[in-house]
Image (cartoon, grey):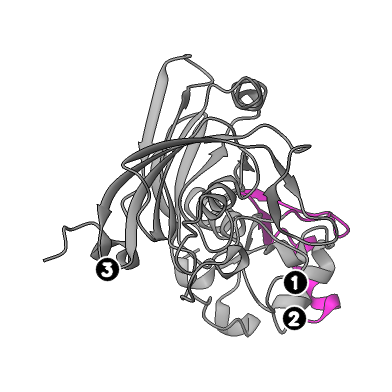
Amino acid sequence: MTASALTRLLVPPSLAGERLDRFLPAVTTLSRRRSRDLVAAGEVWRNGQPLRVQSRQLAAGDVIDVLRPAVELGVPPRPELEPVEVLHEDRSLLFANKPAGVLSQPAERRREGETALDERLLLQLALAAGRPPFLRLVHRLDRGTSGVLLFATDPRALPPLSSAWREGRVQRRYLAVVSGCPPAEEEVEQPIARVEGAWRFEVEPGGKPARTRIRRLNEGDGWSLVECQLETGRTHQVRVHLAHLGYPVLGDRLYGGPPGDRPLLHAAELTLPHPRTGKALTVTAPPPQDLTPYLTVPV
């Protein structure tokens, strides 16, 4: 069997849980009866193994090989998803570089046809390995935020990762471009709570404890580049604390920032104890293109 006589299909998240004999007609021009005949003849494989159970439910990332040429199945060329940049990968962990404007994981109010980063990465890894990998998102970044995003690739890594997060042994460093000129160094320790009836947060005496260390790195005409070290990990913590101090992130309209394509916030670095060795591991994401003009000293 030559490669041209084999058609490789990937099960997308939207068809997870679908039966095999319904999946094939959904993504090819095969009838359900013809699909069943191919399965019965051993011409349909899943993750490198022949599959003869018509009612088998499929999982996102499953690799389905049909021993027939693509032209016979009426399969169009697979649309190219932008590859996910992997910053670091080992037996337990994978660190990805999330672009701004991409969801970390599926959300109820996502745009039609939008693919979240965890979905892209799952399909990318499945295609490379010929089988779906174990992949679990450990934390999230907002849609508009770029930078380091952590996944577990071994279920045994999840309990120690959870403990490290809960016990404050994870260090996160952000870069942000803000309006105004904050002090050279400042530490803000203000509790944060969700605004009732809205998806935004604010400094509130009855909120959860939150602490951020801020250091000014650069400044220009009406803006400053700051580094933020998170001592806690509350939702929107950097954005809320900076806005509370009077220095909202550029592009962060939700918290009073000047208009822009996106909040200029970048998760630059993540340090944590490795779940297998216990040794500190630091992974850094280079600044994206829209942040680079703020990194150099203005003339």
Q: Inspect the magenta stretch and tell me whether residue 44 lies in it.
A: yes
Q: Position of residue 181 (x, y in %)?
A: 35, 55
Q: Quadrant of residue 114?
A: bottom right
Examine the rendered structure and indicate whether residue 15 appears above or below residue 76.
above
- Three-letter amino acid code of the residue under disc 2: Leu
- Three-letter amino acid code of the residue under disc 3: Asp
Q: CA distance from mark 2 to mark 3?
A: 62 Å
The magenta stretch is 31-59
Which residue extends farthest top?
278
Residue for point 75% across, 60% down: 199
Judged from the image, the secondary structure of the residue bearing numbered disc 1 is: helix
Q: Position of residue 142 (x, y in %)?
A: 59, 57
Q: Position of residue 178 (x, y in %)?
A: 41, 59
Task: Determine which residue is flagged by label 1.
Answer: 24
Q: Nearer the viewer, mark 2 or mark 3?
A: 3
Task: Determine which residue is flagged by label 3.
Answer: 221
Instruction: Tell me if mark 2 has few (under 14), some (14-19) or many (20+) residues whose alpha carbon lies within 10 angstroms of its own.
Output: some
Instruction: Tell me if mark 1 has few (under 14), some (14-19) or many (20+) residues whose alpha carbon lies within 10 angstroms of its own.
Output: many
- Three-letter amino acid code of the residue under disc 1: Leu
Residue for point 66% across, 77% down: 113
